[in-house]
Image: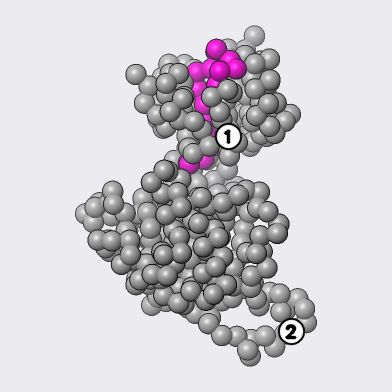
Amino acid sequence: MSKYKVIFLKELDVSGKNILWDDGAEIIVTGGHSEEVFIQEIRDNQVDAIMCRTEIVTPAMMDASPNLKVIAKHGVGLDNIDMEYATKKGIQVVYAPLGNSNSVAEHVIMLMLMAARRFQHVDREFRNGNFDVRYTLQDTYELDGKTLGILGCGRIGQIIANKAAFGFGMDVIGYDPYAKQEQMKAPIKLLKSRDDVLAQSDFISLNLPSLPSTRGSIDLEAFQKMKDKAIFINCSRGDVVVEADLIRALQEGVILGAGLDVFDKEPIDYTNPLLEMSNVIMTPHTAATTQQAVIRCCSTAAQGIVEVMNNKPVAFPGNKID
């Protein structure tokens, strides 16, 4: 007989399952995608733990099983979980803050390179038979000597800065109201205002969580403060950006281009004008999906469940339970 039950809201890497099986857990993988189905399966199985990735975990889902003690997030951002309600109910949230940092940082660098070399435009022209597209290229750049501005200088921001400065010879500046210069483990020169970073940067990497204070904070006014040759990169959260303003800024030449892994609405609406823009590089929220990152995230989240269910100290708590 199992010690406890864990429901996976989607199929995840076996590394996490192995940790839970070794601890005597029973694992249920949901067969649905809607809140209604999740609620029914949580209720039917009276689970002790929920393992999620990007699926929304609602109060109704938490109420579906009185046995629920822990919600584990396969990843970093906790905006898909109703944290206030979980804390109110005494449900521990655990996550994997170290799991995908390097993968996301590498993805940011990849998008910077692709945007700087106008990969989208070149790829389309080449596939349409224009091998001589190189003779007509404009606005392509090396990263060396360019200035990278980082908004949000936490773990991922600092990894990006190290790769950009030491790998590509970039100057790195940043803004983070919670960071201090003496705490930087990367060559980031912190500036006193976000607007200064926007105005001075050739490339801007957004590394902010989705919070009431950050949602919609990158709007047309912010884009207008950037250089007209600036390239905007977002591998954090889509709702931090006013997407209609980004589209306008790209269409009107307010900024040169963008590299995007996240969007205001996911899955993206396939009528979205961004899909047709040759100055935009897009990937479908895949920055954290390297093999190494997936294993690290899944294993760490599963270990968090084991810790809670065995009354052990929690290595990576997402909330504080009294």
- Give the residue at mark 1: 56
Q: Position of residue 228 (x, y in %)?
A: 45, 77
Report which quarter residue 223 is drawn in: bottom left
Give left or right: position of 136 versus 185: right
Residue 123 percent coordinates (x, y):
68, 74
- Determine the secondary structure under disc 1: loop
In the image as oriented, which residue stretches furthest toward the right? 129
Q: Which residue is mark 2?
A: 130
Is-magenta flag for residue 68? yes
Q: Are marks 1 and 2 in contact (CB under 8 Å)?
A: no
Where is residue 108 drawn, in percent x and y? 50, 60
Q: Secondary structure at mark 2?
A: loop
Q: Is residue 100 visible?
A: yes
The answer to whether residue 102 shows anywhere in this view is no
Q: Residues within 10 Å of mark 1 (few under 14, many from 20)?
A: some
- The C terminus lies in quadrant: top left
Numbered-mark total: 2
Q: Residues within 10 Å of mark 2 (few under 14, many from 20)?
A: few
Magenta: main secondary structure: loop
Q: Quadrant for the N terminus, please.
A: top right
Left or right relative to 46: residue 96:
left
Does the magenta-highlighted stretch encompass residue 263? no
Distance from the alpha carbon under mark 1 to that under mark 2: 45 Å
Q: Which mark is drawn over residue 183?
A: none
What are the residue bounds of the magenta stretch?
62-77
In this view, the residue in front, 269 or 234, is 269
- Please indicate whether residue 32 sits to the left or right of residue 112 in the image: right
- Mark 1 residue type: Ile
1 or 2: tag closer to the N-terminus:
1
